[in-house]
Amino acid sequence: MELPNEHFQNFPIEFKEINPDEFRSVGFDVQDKVIIEPNNDGYIFDALKDTISISEKNTVVVNAPVGYGKSYAIIKLIKAIYEIKPKSKIIVATPFVSLVEQYVTDINQEGNVPSQDIYSYSNLGRNKKESYKNKRVHVLTVNTLLGNPGEDGFKNSDAKRLYIDNLIGESSNDNSEVFFIYDEIHDSIQNFKEEFMLYLWKWKDVIHKNIILSATYNEASKVVIKYLAELTDMKIQIIESVRRIFPERQSQLYLHYSADYSFKSTTNELVNVVDDLLKRNRNIDILSYSKSLAKSIIKDKEGIGKKLKERFGALNDCTSELPYNQRPENEPPENRYKNDMCNVGTNFKTGVSIKKDNHSFIIVLPPRGARLLFKNLYGIFSNGTNDVIQALARQRTKGEIHIILPRPDEFDFESLKKTAMSKEQRAKFEEHYSKVKNINPKEENPVQYFSLQKQDYILQNFYHKTLYGFVVNEDLEVSKTKRNLSLPRLEYPPFEIWKLNRGEQYLANQIKFFGEDLSAYVTYCAFTNQFINCTLTEVNEKGSLFFDEEKIQNQLLTYFDIHFGVEHFRMRHIASNFSLFYEDLKKEFFNNFQIKLKVKDSENYLSVKPGVNREFEIQLLLFCHRLYQNYGNTLNIENDGDYTRSKYLLDCIATANSLDDTAKSKYSLKQKARIEAFQSLGSLRDKMIQAIKESSKTPKFKFLPPKPSDDFKTFEDIKIIENIMVVLGEDPLFQNDIFLLRRNLVNKNNVEKKIESIYKVLINDFFILSDETHQVKINGKNQGVHTIEKIIELPKSSTINLLLTRDFDEVYTSVVEEFILQIPKSVEDNSPKYKTIDEYYADMLNRLQR
């Protein structure tokens, strides 16, 4: 099978650049950017050591991709500083507690720095015998360094405050040059608020150099760079590594698209992946977007949780147990990733190196149901695309990465003209993307490609036009007013502060390509070879749903609850007639899944294509009707029912007869022709009823001649047959022979034979006949006829209405109109308050203005 990334070999890898002009424009002294190359093994330390001047006071920004040995480079830099600057102190600030002990170990073992000269802040409150005084290397978290007590605290602990103050005092007394190393700075930006930055100013007299490293810089991190560089005499050096792919080190990437509205431990794609990996005896870790999903896998006693325990023993629960994100008095962290266990959880998206052999890493991204209007519920991926890149980078050895992800939204392929894609590449991207996208008939906001370098422009535009632009006059008025100094400060946050505090959340929640639709971003990157540590190997665009004859209704209900759910179709139900509702749900099933059906007494499941298998089509139609009619109520399990051609014809005739010329004017010419065809068929039915005869002999019985009389072969009847031919060409249930009728007419050579054929069909569809036959004399000849026991009545309600199809806008408007016209003026007056939608909107606008 052709893979999309085959067409994007050597396609340029886009990354967040850090450029000198962004800092020079506001007064920083910035050298020209230094571009470095990784060595033949894909590591950057050799290039870094020749570029960074340990003796120069400045802030060094290292921008290098995942997997290029940044952590190794940090260790070697620490060793070099330790040896070259004997009167220095080195502060390693990490974003996570889990990285502290790892750095302590690596600095000692790989950097050959004596353990007695290294202090881990984790000893505070735990190991009081371990003194931090006179030690040269300190490893701590960024929030400890900046005095951030966390979301629920009010101040850092006294022990941490004393530790920092003593360290500063010791450095000042010893005239030590202090080096700060910030690893994965993008994960620490929440600490660099104004109130906490003043903690760093305590180091102003002793700081010598900041070294900042990340593979995934963001716009907010640029603000942090400015804050830190201010402490090093406004001097900045930017070092950027080229992005090169080393195929021999890349893991295989598998994308498993799921149509489920929410992801559970029973989600087909997740179950299938785990089963396959267990069958192939792979080592497995599962990183989940949410704690609840991870917990459900761990506690699972029947499905994949049970299977994983049977293979690996107890599963390592890597989810935080802290109820309010508090760890009293520096308690040791629990539930950390363990390299010798099967890990399931949320807390190893970053800061962990998975180096298992024969390893498969499963990443479960947020499903469509996690997307809300203003803020996503994406869990560990709430900060957008950088979270995904970091998660993929946990796989350090060559292995497999399996991503369970929802189908992405429609893509604006015109926006791809802003990329380096050729016309042919854009066509291939569109071809493959269209196979995996979510089927949504009304997509008003497709995914647009944006360059990473456009992020600042997007944020500037939103801030200045939508936020500050809304209150700029008031802000200027306040600034001109001589306010009492005792009053609280009143000024709008400047752009840089807003960008630091809210910018990344805005991009991740409001711009589809940068995080609102993570699946679209992952799809784009995988298709165009943007991921450095893995390459797209397989795309599983459709899961399979298995049905058994005579159990289809029950199984449809189960699959609907699992993969769609009531909330998913609530709005579609409100703004749909039945035909639109049915077509949407049918598309969801067939476009997102491979439908497999096992016929009774058969052992094999056979693939079902849309509109072909009568049994499945009828049961799906009945299920959709049951769902539509009982919306909001709990559906009970039902046995498979039957919906005959007779019922369908009578439903359509009843619907067509209910429409007058005014109602028909809403529809297209084709739709009108279809309506008129069924109205004509109703007229033919009336004619047949009028032609019923009664026998002259006793016991008397009613019958119709086996062939139509000459009265039926009139011009009007010929017209009816022509109209029916129109129906057969347009009607989905006739044109695919779900209901047989088309062949009766298409295979006949002349109109007379067609009338005879349809006459025989309609006798069986419009009347209940007895099995008993009688001989009656018709036109002088004895002919056998069936007794008519009953005329089948036209339905009066609850018809399956596939006759009326309208587009979404028309249906939605009609629903809104109906709702508005039902709004009474008051409780006492039940007459409609508004006669039109325009009246309603005008009144609402007046209320808002008042």
Image (cartoon, helix red, strand yellow):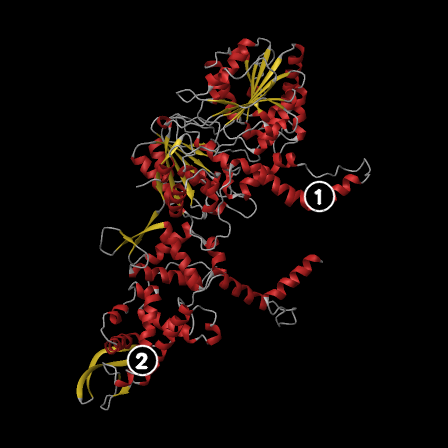
Q: Give left or right: position of 514 versus 603.
A: right
Q: Nearer the viewer, residue 124 or 452?
A: 452
Provide the residue designation for mark 1: 472
Compared to 558, does 58 lie above or below?
above
Quadrant, the C terminus? bottom right
Q: Residue furthest front?
A: 423
Q: How many marks?
A: 2
Q: Position of residue 778 (x, y in %)?
A: 21, 87
Which residue shows up at 55% across the image and 66% down it?
817
In the rendered image, which quarter contains the N terminus?
A: top left
Q: Amino acid at mark 2?
A: Asp
Q: Earlier in the sequence, mark 2 or mark 1?
A: 1
Q: Which residue is mark 2?
A: 717
Q: Secondary structure at mark 1?
A: helix
Question: Quarter of the image holding residue 302?
Answer: top left
Residue 264 in sight here: no
